[in-house]
Image (cartoon, rainbow, N blue to C red):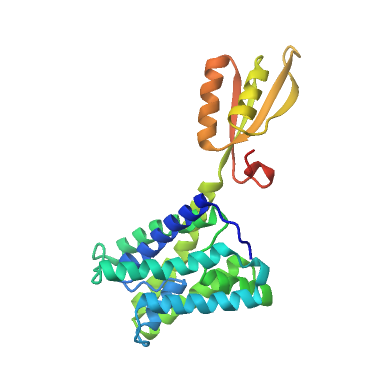
Amino acid sequence: MKAKISFKEFLMMLAGMFLMSAAVYYIMMPDHLVLGSLSGLVLVLVNVIPVSVSTLTFILNALLLVIGYIFIGKEFGLKTVLTSLMLPVYLRIFEIVTPDVESLSGNIVIDLACFMVVISLGQALLFNMNASSGGLDVIAKLLNKYLGFKIGESLTIAGFMIACTSIFVYDRETMIISLIGTYIYGLVLDRYCDGFRIRKKVCILSSRYREIQEYIVKELHRGATLYQAYGGMGLAEHMEIATILEKNEYGKLLSFIHQTDPSAFVTVSTVNEVIGEWNKKR
């Protein structure tokens, strides 16, 4: 189990789990949305087990943590443990502060849309730093390890099975909406996560390439690759700089280029994901 976690990561986990917990308590619970998650299963079980949502969430998460630690082992990180415990803590706080909660808008479809946006943002914050909310993720890893399903397939299978259990305590309409919501949730989550991973690849042709290279390396703390390039019309020799930046870094670089060499030729493309040492700033 990895023991290292930075203060920034901890704050991000707190924020992500706050959004997810608020979505569950203030939107999911009042509308009886049994979406494909551990919280959805809890909403079903509290109808037959006389305990609070926060207590049952804690019990199930603790049980899954033990199972995950035994059967998954090294892949089971400290971040998953912390996020699994944060959810019932937040839910208990909400239960004390606002014990009686009504539907957000009175319309289950509108509430479902709001739920998707809020919980997907919270989940994306966790995924962006390689953390998870525990619960269903543990089940997905078990299905992946012992039955050979991919993680995405495992989450979908477990999610739809949980959504189907709503028929036992609610009605068919609730089950259908829960199934549709589970499917949409996966799509929205993918969209959010893609947004976090998007980077800018910037290619620059400039006679002052040394100054631009130094700015990228020393000020932005990013790598820069230099290529010899030849113009197609006059075969004039140029030096091209290529670098990959985050969105805010790209804005800083563009401002610097405009000040240093207004005649520089710059092309920009979108990179969906970067893997490797680029992710570690010096």
**x and y percentages locating residue 14 in the rendered image:** 44, 57
Taking depth in this image into account, of 152 and 90 the one nearest to the observer is: 90
**x and y percentages locating residue 86 in the rendered image:** 44, 66
Taking depth in this image into account, of 130 and 10 the one nearest to the observer is: 10
Q: Quadrant of residue 16?
A: bottom left
Q: Quadrant of residue 92?
A: bottom left
Q: Quadrant of residue 68?
A: bottom right
**x and y percentages locating residue 54 in the rendered image:** 38, 74
**x and y percentages locating residue 265 in the rendered image:** 61, 20
> From what the image shows, is residue 6 above or below residue 101?
above
Quarter containing the C terminus = top right
Quarter containing the N terminus = bottom right
Residue 147 lies left or right of residue 127; in this view the side is right
How many numbered marks are there?
Answer: 0
> From what the image shows, is residue 231 above or below residue 86?
above
Taking depth in this image into account, of 262 and 269 the one nearest to the observer is: 262
Residue in the picture at 36% in, 88% down? 48
Q: Is residue 7 visible?
A: yes
Residue 226 lies left or right of residue 157; in this view the side is right
Taking depth in this image into account, of 227 and 235 the one nearest to the observer is: 227
Residue in the picture at 76% in, 14% down? 235
Residue in the picture at 52% in, 36% down? 247
Q: Is residue 148 visible?
A: no
